Amino acid sequence: MASLSLKKITAVWIYTILILFVLAILMGITMRFTQGKTISVSPIEFYLLMTTHGVTMIGIWAAAGIVAVNYLLARYIKVSTSLNVFALVFTVISILMLWASTFIGKFHAGWTFLYPLPFHIAWETWATPMFLWSLMVLSVSWFIWTLGSMVQILKKYSLRQSFAIQHISKKSPSVETPPLVLISMVSLLGMVVCFIAAIILLALLLAEYYSAGKFVNDPLLIKNLTFFFGHTIANEALYLGLATLYELLPEVSGRPKFKTTWYVALGWNCAIIFILGAFFHHLYMDFVQPKGFQIFGQIASYFATIPSVVVTIISIVTLLYNNKIKWSLVNLLFFIGLMGWIIGGIGAVIDATISNNIILHNTLWVPAHFHTYNVMGNVLFSLAFFVWVANEFSDNNDLQKYNKLVMPLLMVGGFGFVLMFYWAGAYSVPRRFAMYPSELSSGTALASAAAWFACIYLVGVLLVLFDVLKKCAKVFSSSSH
Ligand code: HEM
């Protein structure tokens, strides 16, 4: 069970994540209103908002996943509170450095900081190393955080058991691995590997920066490392959200806990390879990349979704079918989050198909699909955990008592917001344009509509935030548990 210190640090994480989330949504709304010509910000301001928004959003929702599984893992293993405190301190330092590089130094090369953009200095000279160091601080501290979390699991379960291998060959093995442990291990492993890639990438970029022209990187290697890191961290965050769903959804629905079956174990173990290999679909337009990688990228993109999606759908259908479910805000958030995750996943697979990618590449279809499985997928999984844990902190077990406006606001606002991205993407409106030229006037109108939908979503988020933050405060006045 979670100790009081783990509860407190989890509450501080939730405060940090939700406040940053609201600020990052406001940046997103400002960008959409700018593209819709409702307000006007300069192109530099647009791109520095886009850069800050992208890194902050990816960072906070990856953090939310790690925080949630760490809290829930305390049911099965001893979780290190000091590791969570360490990660929080360095995350805050990294965010302050990042925001200084963008808001003060005007760094605006996008969240993918695609090489050689960071070295074409169109901002304060110090902003490039500040941005790169901010990511280095984050990558090193999160490498320690995720590796440390895996080590904690391995103190209780052997390597084989932690990946539930014994479930593949035996129906009832002597040691059972809970799905939470299995999915956490799979996702944390992916994160550890992607942070190693990030550290190598940042070291190479910093080496070029400080060598004053004596050392020059290979652009293709840097692009591979960048997308291996960026694509993987964004995806693994989703799987941590799913780990939370597996643990909490049956419990809050009044159903028996999910068990690890042979197909759950097999599906998630296969997912390791496919999730790590899917990033190659970001390099379809890099024709010097060996052809085999492109083909593997398409196959991995298809298969990355199949094990986890199919297995998860089978598990959820079994849970819901013909059963009386006690609906509450927590399982509604999980359920709608699952829908958003699947819709976004279909959008991703459409884009990852080489023949479609020729048309959809770098159009608004790209932010369409990844916003769907984040805004209406992973964010909802994490909000479900926040609501559940806040109720636990405040000893309020009545999950059914909540503001009935929350779900309609999140659904109308969230799905409306992403629909405008899909619509514009289908009309070939390019992504990352601060303002659309007159030939793309449909992009302008759709951007305005999207901004209003995002405002509706924001109201829903604020309703959740006020409730969760009020309840989380209770943990600081508590001396028991
Ligand atoms: C309602 C909430 C949100 C709004 C209004 C919003 C808005 C936007 C806008 C307008 C863009 C620029 C799109 C373009 O023209 O290329 C963008 C980019 C992006 N957003 Fe969001 N977003 C939201 C939520 C999220 C979430 C939850 C995540 C991730 C977990 C996220 C991650 C990103 C990323 C990674 C980019 C790409 C930045 C870049 O290209 O450098 N956003 N968002």
Image: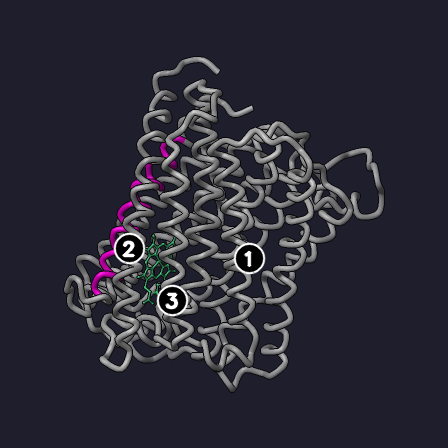
Q: Is residue 203 visible?
A: no
Asked which secondary structure carries label 1, the reply is helix
Helix, strand or loop for the magenta stretch, by majority: helix
Q: Which mark is in front, 1 or 3?
A: 3
For marks 2 and 1 on the same chain, the one whose residue lies earlier in the sequence: 2
**Amino acid type at mark 1:** Val
Q: Is mark 3 within 8 Å of ligand 1?
A: yes
Residue 222: x and y, percent? 44, 73
Tell me the residue at 15%/64% (across/down): 41
User: Which residue position holds label 1?
Assistant: 193
Asked which secondary structure carries label 2, the reply is helix
Residue 152: x and y, percent? 59, 37
Q: Are marks 1 and 3 in contact (CB under 8 Å)?
A: no
Q: Which stretch appears magenta? A: 11-34
User: Which residue position holds label 2?
Assistant: 98
Decide if residue 250 is on the left or right side of residue 417. Answer: right
Give the position of the N terminus as an image quadrant. top right
**Amino acid type at mark 3:** Thr
Closest to the observer: 438 or 72? 438
Decide if residue 408 is on the left or right side of residue 241. Answer: left
User: Which residue position holds label 3?
Assistant: 112
CA distance for labels 1 and 3? 18 Å
